[in-house]
Amino acid sequence: MKVVLQNLTKKFPNRNKKAPDVIAVNNFNFEIPDGKLIGLLGPSGCGKSTTLHLLSGLQKPTGGRIFFGEDDVTDLPAEHRGVGLVFQNYALYPHLTVRQNICFPLENLKGAAKLTKAQMHKKALEAAKLVQIDGLMDRKPSELSGGQQQRVAIARALVKMPRVLLLDEPLSNLDARLRLQTREELRRIQKETGITTVFVTHDQEEAMSISDMIVVMKDGVIQQIGKPQEVYDNPVNLFVAKFLGNPPINVFAGQVKDGKLYIGEDAVMDVKESMDREVYVGIRPEGFILKENGVLGCGLNGVEVMGRDISVVSTHEACEAAAIRAIISAENKVDFDAKTVRFDLKPDKVFLFSKDTEERIYVKTE
């Protein structure tokens, strides 16, 4: 099911009646291809959950239209949109069994769609098998682990085979290992069912690992849309560059002068740029090459061994953060007792941004 959002806007009244309305979603335009998993990604308050609630029908937009396929569903009540919604807190009925929880959406079907109890139980079992909880059908939520409860919530959303599946931070209540396992399961289920899915999260690692495309949002406005790796490799502004990546990108105050990029006193790269100006320089942690006579000199704070990789922690007066993190291969030999360390830089991992607008500056490097 293709989903199209046209100029979607949602405003909330400001508590201060003299102040303008709060714009949670601002002129959102996007087409979600049929059968794809899309990640809505951004910090708290960016409008991603509001966008999901507009899609589900739980909230009405202030402006714009929503289409499921060719159908305009903007004014359609939530129960008639054919969506499955999974909440962060599972929202299971504690007094019902797993089977009864999964069957619950089917009990409200009427007319030609009405099912017998046997048909409902059959569909519930099929949904439970899909999320691998078919052996737990007679248990109640209090007898389940957090991951099992989340699977019940997903099965309940899938049992009607919705046109669109909406997931509102469904993994945030799980521990780290279970979160990893469950997101892999989500991807498998989405692939098997082919249901168009919108996944809301503030965790960039989750979004990048399972999404076909990600939408990075800030203050209700789309910042960038693309395949996860493409967005990571080519951020359009400083916000996107900072938001994606773990460890985060290292940001320096820099200067383009006479065809060279300077960080502090070090000329770190030749650039084909006609205008001299001050810039922000973003360097991904994997963009550093340890070299005795490297172009960038930093103060060595320490080395963290992570198995196959090493994290070299250093400082530089031009860096906006307290520490620089450079991820290099464990095959490198670092002098733990040295006071300084030097790096060469990988040009494709270095990004320049305007000091004024924080928009990306595209320059050719040598």
Image (cartoon, rainbow, N blue to C red):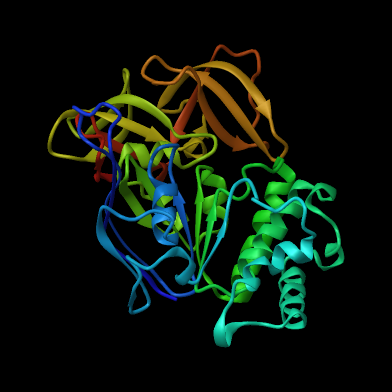
Indicate the position of residue 7 as horizontal and vertical percent values.
24, 58
The answer to whether residue 40 is left or right of residue 187 is left
Residue at point 36%, 50% (across, down): 234
**Screen quadrant of the C terminus:** top left
Residue at point 33%, 37% (across, down): 238
In the displayed structure, would residue 55 be above or below residue 124? above
**Screen quadrant of the N terminus:** bottom left
The answer to whether residue 36 is left or right of residue 186 is left
From the viewer's side, name the closer residue of 28 and 33: 28
Indicate the position of residue 352 as horizontal and vertical percent values.
29, 37
Q: Residue furthest bottom?
A: 112
Residue at point 44%, 21% (across, down): 321
Residue at point 53%, 28% (across, down): 325
The answer to whether residue 268 is left or right of residue 129 is left
From the viewer's side, name the closer residue of 79 and 330: 79
Identify the image quadrant of residue 123: bottom right
Identify the image quadrant of residue 262: top left
In the displayed structure, would residue 113 be above or below residue 225? below
From the viewer's side, name the closer residue of 87 and 59: 59
Q: Residue furthest front?
A: 111
Indicate the position of residue 183 as horizontal and vertical percent values.
64, 55
In the displayed structure, would residue 243 be above or below residue 90? above
For the image, the number of numbered tags is: 0
